[in-house]
Image (cartoon, grey):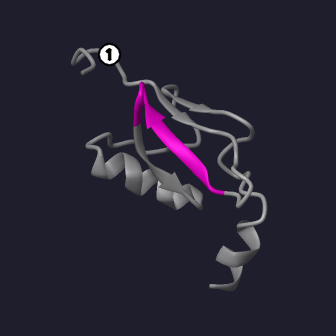
Amino acid sequence: MAHPTEHPHVVVHPPALDGSRRVTEGDETLGIATHVDDVSEILRLADLYVTDISESDFIDWQGGGPDDWPGLSEHHEEA
């Protein structure tokens, strides 16, 4: 567990073949995201409240930023 004055190190991993992205904190998988809103919800459920995940210093976006969801963005636009 992180020290109260430290921020957790959250990683949003590069997109998988289906476009989804794994979200981890340390060695723990917090969830699988298919959209940037999923990342917010995954963090909320883990009691990691972030007001702006796009600009957060403790989220490491690997393989693309919060707008990179290859193959999945079209699905969310249709919904």
x then y, percent, for residue 2: 27, 19
Tell me if mark 1 has few (under 14), some (14-19) or many (20+) residues whose alpha carbon lies within 10 angstroms of its own: few
- Quadrant for the C terminus, please: bottom right
Using the image, determine if residue 31 lies above or below residue 28: below
Magenta-drawn segment: 20-28
Using the image, determine if residue 37 lies above or below residue 7: below
From the image, tell me which residue sits under label 1.
6
Magenta stretch holds residue 34: no
Residue at x-position 71% and y-position 52%:
67
Using the image, determine if residue 16 lies above or below residue 64: below
Using the image, determine if residue 28 lies above or below residue 76: above
Residue situated in front as seen by the camera: 75 or 40: 75
Q: Is residue 41 left or right of residue 21?
A: left
Magenta stretch holds residue 26: yes
Q: Amino acid at mark 1?
A: Glu
Q: Is residue 76 left or right of residue 58?
A: right
x then y, percent, for residue 57: 52, 26
The rendered magenta stretch, by its main secondary structure, is classed as strand
Residue at x-position 78% and y-position 58%:
70
Q: Secondary structure at mark 1?
A: loop
Residue at x-position 57% and y-position 56%:
36
